[in-house]
Amino acid sequence: MLTLFKPYGTTGREENLYGDLVNVVGVTQPIGPARDAEIREKIRTCDILEADVDIPINKELLKDAENLKAVLCNSIGTDYVNIKEVTELGIPVGNNPDFCIEAVAEYAIGLMFAIARKIPKAADGVADGNWLIRRVTGGMEILGKTFGLIGFGRIGREVARMAKGLGMEVIAYDAYMNPEAARAMGVEPVGLEEIYERADVISIHAPLTEGTRGLIDKAAIEKMKDGAYLINVSRGGIVVEQDLADAIKEKKLGGVALDVLEQEPPEADHPLLGLIDENVVITPHTAWNTWEADKKADDHFGVQLRAVIAGQTPPALLNPETIHHPRHKGWYR
């Protein structure tokens, strides 16, 4: 029986779902040098590595993983995996491309309503016994407003569909988008500068790459409409968080909703924490978290496991050239 190693969290879920397929092992040591050593030792001997944003996956971590047949990611995004380095080692990497598209899209729309109508601030006021908070929690109606998408992949397109259904004008930027496909959805393809200039609400749905890291910085924010709302459910590193905090304090933006941060969880002195009165909403990277998405993720991961165990190419493989690497000694057919 092959060994599945999960180097973060608990393993109860995996044991219940896949315990008849693989020997599931996890980490036992608390955070610190002992835990780091345990992770390295178990990676050295495991057959399959379960990966997520909690642990950066790179050549240094996997260099002694002689038995490793696959890295299977629970997420859509794989920016925490150095695909180039892992491919050089000959290790297949698979992701989970479908599981939370609807969940994340719905969450982005929910965050838009939360900041456009200052719902968290109103709820906090009532919890503090301040019924008159309603006098200062007015907001913007979204009907007829312009919704700007940065990123037009599967989640971005689903957000566009929902925003169109709410009566918004939708514009979108993506370096790789199909303009005809966008227009067929009633979405206007535009340049990035036009997103900044025209959008009342900007929602980020781009992957974190060298090209998008720090994309939303002081210069970009200055180009946005005064009072615009910004939403990020993609990756924290796309936004320069100190620049965003400065813009909020200067009243440049009407509100900000972030489900992702560059460091998760944030340090206590993070510049955007504690700004709920300034209409800043931060949630703990939970946009993906629905019952339905969990079921899709579990099902897909099970399919991947069964494929690897059987020596077959797992679905959603990001580097198929590794399947016949000499390290696998004929494991994959």
Image (cartoon, rainbow, N blue to C red):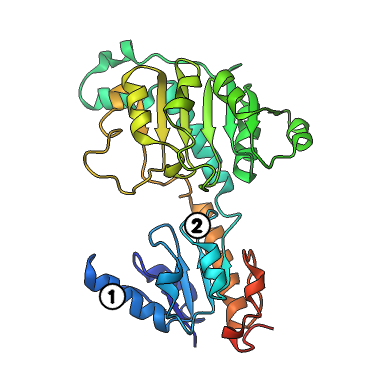
- Taking the spot 55% from the left edge, 67% from the top edge, the residue there is 301
Decide: few, some or many residues near mark 2? Use Cα within 10 Å; few <14, some 14-19, many ≥20: some
- With respect to residue 134, does 328 lie above or below? below
Residue 299 % position (x, y) = 57, 65
1 vs 2, front mark: 1
Q: Residue 266 carries which label?
A: none
Asked which quadrant contains residue 122, the reply is top left
- With respect to residue 275, does 4 lie above or below? below
Residue 67 % position (x, y) = 48, 84
**Which residue is denoted by mark 2 in the rendering?**
294
Kind of element beneath mark 2 = helix
* Of 39 and 136, the residue lying toward us: 39
Pointers 1 and 2 in contact (CB under 8 A)? no
Q: What residue type is labelled 2?
A: Asp
- With respect to residue 89, does 228 lie above or below? above
- Taking the spot 64% from the left edge, 44% from the top edge, the residue there is 153
Compared across the picture, whether 327 is left or right of 227 comes to: right
- With respect to residue 76, does 107 lie above or below? above
**Which residue is denoted by mark 1 in the rendering?**
37
Residue 262 % position (x, y) = 38, 45
Q: Which quadrant of the rendered structure holds the C terminus?
A: bottom right
Residue 42, visible in the rendered structure:
yes
- Taking the spot 50% from the left edge, 57% from the top edge, the residue there is 294
- Taking the spot 65% from the left edge, 67% from the top edge, the residue there is 315
* Of 199 and 290, the residue lying toward us: 199
Q: Distance between the residues labelled 1 and 2?
A: 30 Å
Q: Which amino acid does label 1 sit on?
A: Ala
Q: Which of marks 1 and 2 is nearer the N terminus?
A: 1
Residue 29, visible in the rendered structure:
no
